[in-house]
Image (cartoon, rainbow, N blue to C red):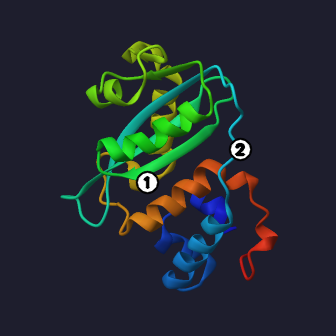
Amino acid sequence: MIVKLVRNGVGMRSISRIMNIAVSTVIRKVRQIAERIKKPAVMLGENVVEIDELRTFVGAKIKPCWIAYVLCSDTRQIIDFSVGGRTKQMLGKVVNTAILAGVKCIKTDGLILYKYLIPSDLHISNAYKINYIERYNLNLRTHLKRLQRRTICFSRSKVLLESCLKIYFWGERIDVSTVRGVK
């Protein structure tokens, strides 16, 4: 039940009210569920992936945080994501995942950091070539209230944001019966 509610953008306090359990219990269960979720195996030799980032807030509205992720253009699956500042190290994590997977092409927007991280023979930098990931950004903002641009909702901690993203991206793969005490 918690997985379904998180995937549909219901906040921790709302889940608490719906299930009639404490907020701290909901947060603990969300973290337990997220720990059991493993990243999907990367298919070697994927043809094309898209990388993009979107901004949100963690802790307070004055503390911006970025979510960068890799989307396979063929399967529309999220391969990897990273949460943090918009830095070379954070973006490098998702770029390295794509490069190690042996992709033939990496499409990004015009962010200058990608130029230094992605080999030029793999890189296509054009805002019109990343339609699938931009659409996914809109879906994320629609489905997860904490990612909407103009809202009073935001994540209180980076760990909880990462947990909710894991559940959203890969939650259908989890066997919920393996998490004890989760309804």
- Residue 164 % position (x, y): 53, 60
- The residue that appears at 49% across and 71% down in the rendered structure is 12
The mark that comes first in sequence, 1 or 2, is: 2
Would you call the spot at circle 2 few (<14 residues within 10 Å), some (14-19), or many (20 or more)?
few
- In terms of depth relative to the viewer, which is nearer, 138 or 30? 30
Residue appearing at x 61%, y 57% in the figure:
167
Viewer-nearest residue: 138 or 169: 169
Query: Quadrant of the rendered structure where residue 73 is?
Result: top right
Tell me if 177 is positioned left or right of 73 in this view.
right
Q: Nearer the viewer, residue 32 or 181?
A: 32
Q: Amino acid at mark 2?
A: Ala
Image location of residue 105, percent across then percent down: 54, 18
Where does label 1 land, which residue? 145
Tag shown at residue 98: none
Query: Could you tell me if residue 14 is visible in this image?
Result: yes
Q: Amino acid at mark 1?
A: Lys
Say which residue appears at 64% left-offset and 31% top-offset. Answer: 76
